[in-house]
Image: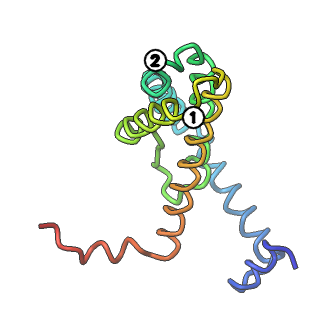
Amino acid sequence: MTFIASTLHYFKVSIPVLAPTCRARLSDWLAEELQPEQLVKSLTAGFLIYIEEVIAVVSFAALIFSKELSSQLPYAVGLVLAGDALLCLFIGIFSSYSGSIGIEQDAPVAILALSAAAIVAALPLGASQAERFSTVVMMIVATTLATGLISSCSGRLSWGDSCVSCPTR
């Protein structure tokens, strides 16, 4: 039994039952979203968020890939823009709330910049620019995946409910 089939079996959902439901929800969603008025609103909002995101993401990439890694900045900007596009795509497709948007945050970028500087300083003196760049990129990928996994588990296991009872002072 495959992982998906066993998961569906665990939640007592069968694929033949799931497919018509998904098709009906998708066609209803498309009919609503492709109305001219809604489409113009969605495209305008998406364009404005895209312009803001490009500015923010380029500055974040410049912060992380500074000093010794500045020669790799064009590659970093491309990777960060692609990652941001994936972020927006996944949130747009998989979010349970239709008004959700995903944007890069500045606080984690400061931590990543410090981590990148520490990693580059810890590498041997003979390390090439490509080795330094790929090490920092892998650090970003690993921390992103770990954060996503922890956040996903927190949501699935309703760990957020326990935070409500935590004292604030």
Instruction: Say which residue label 2 marks.
Output: 67
Query: Which residue is painted at 62% across and 40% down in the image?
Result: 138
In the depicted structure, whether residue 97 falls above or below residue 162? above
Q: Is residue 166 left or right of residue 36?
A: left
Q: Secondary structure at mark 2?
A: helix
Mark with earlier residue (2, 1): 2
Spatial CA distance of label 2 from label 1 is 13 Å
In the depicted structure, whether residue 107 falls above or below residue 4? above
Residue type of the residue flagged with mark 2: Lys
- Please give the label number shown on residue 78: none
Query: How are the colours assigned in the image?
Result: rainbow
Q: Is residue 14 left or right of residue 27?
A: right
- Furthest residue toward left: 169
Nearest to the observer: residue 2 or residue 77 = 77
Residue 61 position within the rendered picture, expressed as x and y whole percent measured from the top left: 49, 25
Q: Is residue 166 left or right of residue 75?
A: left
Q: Quadrant of the C terminus?
A: bottom left
Residue type of the residue flagged with mark 1: Val
Q: Secondary structure at mark 1?
A: helix
Instruction: Say which residue label 1 marks.
Output: 136
Q: Quadrant of the N terminus?
A: bottom right
Picture quarter containing residue 84?
A: top right
In the depicted structure, whether residue 96 falls above or below residue 36? below
Residue 83 position within the rendered picture, expressed as x and y whole percent measured from the top left: 60, 36
- Furthest residue toward right: 1
Query: Which residue is painted at 47% across and 69% down in the image?
Result: 154
Nearest to the observer: residue 114 or residue 98 = 114
Query: Which residue is painted at 56% across and 61% down in the image?
Result: 149
Query: Which residue is painted at 52% across and 60% down in the image?
Result: 96
- Furthest residue toward front: 125
